[in-house]
Image (cartoon, helix red, strand yellow):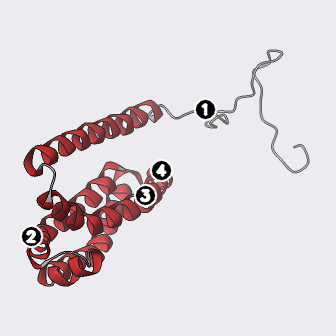
Amino acid sequence: MILGREAIPTSGDAGSAASAPGCIRPGAAPPSAFLSAAAVSFTRGLLMALTLAYGVLSAAYFGAGVAKDCYLVAQTLPSLLSTVLMSGVYGLVLVALAEIGPSEGIAGQLRLVRTTLRQLGFVLIPLCVAATLFPRLVITLIAPGFGPDQQTLSGHLLPFTLFAMVGTVGFAVFRAL
């Protein structure tokens, strides 16, 4: 005992690091850290590739003009929500999963993901339904200078972009596993 603490056994070699059975040395990564880093890197790379494909398909389909403007306006609210939610929720869920993993295992992690997805759904799905029922109001708030034809086109696109955003946020939470 040293000052109320248990002495940590050493290997006996001069200059070698102290080691105790069952203790992880500070700075030492668990064996699955490489796999976790590889999975996160892969999904980020996949996200970049899909974003590039999305931009190319969007430019090919809409071109430049009124239709593209309507699409960008319809994409404004879902982009804002997904950016805010994914930046906050993803980090929090990732940290919580790392803390839960050692004590509760995969079952605890899956329970956390289900709870998070359910809580996000309680917020996002009613918002999507309201925007689907009243798209013209939402578009008018986002782009007050749009004419009736542009509001109609943006209103038709808004439900698709909102429900795609729900899927994107759900995928981000699932990806945290």
The disc label shown at residue 6, or none: none
Q: Amino acid at mark 2?
A: Leu
> Is 175 on the left or on the right of 75, as rendered?
right
Q: Amino acid at mark 4?
A: Ala
Q: Position of residue 111 (x, y in %)?
A: 33, 62
Give me the C-alpha separation between circle 4 and circle 3. 17 Å
Earlier residue among tags 1 and 2 = 1
Label 4 neighbourhood size at 10 Å, few (<14), some (14-19), many (20+)? some
Earlier residue among tags 1 and 4 = 1
Give me the C-alpha separation between circle 1 and circle 4. 15 Å
Front-most of residues 93 and 4: 93
Q: Quadrant of residue 151?
A: bottom left
The residue that disc 3 covers is 87
Q: Position of residue 43 (x, y in %)?
A: 31, 39
The disc label shown at residue 98, or none: 4
The residue that disc 2 covers is 153
> Is 84 on the left or on the right of 156, as rendered?
right
134 vs 73: above or below:
below
Q: Amino acid at mark 3?
A: Ser
Earlier residue among tags 2 and 3 = 3
Earlier residue among tags 3 and 1 = 1
The disc label shown at residue 28, or none: 1
Give me the C-alpha separation between circle 4 and circle 2. 44 Å
Q: Amino acid at mark 1?
A: Ala
Front-most of residues 48 and 109: 48
Q: Are discs 2 and 3 less than 8 Å apart at CB?
A: no
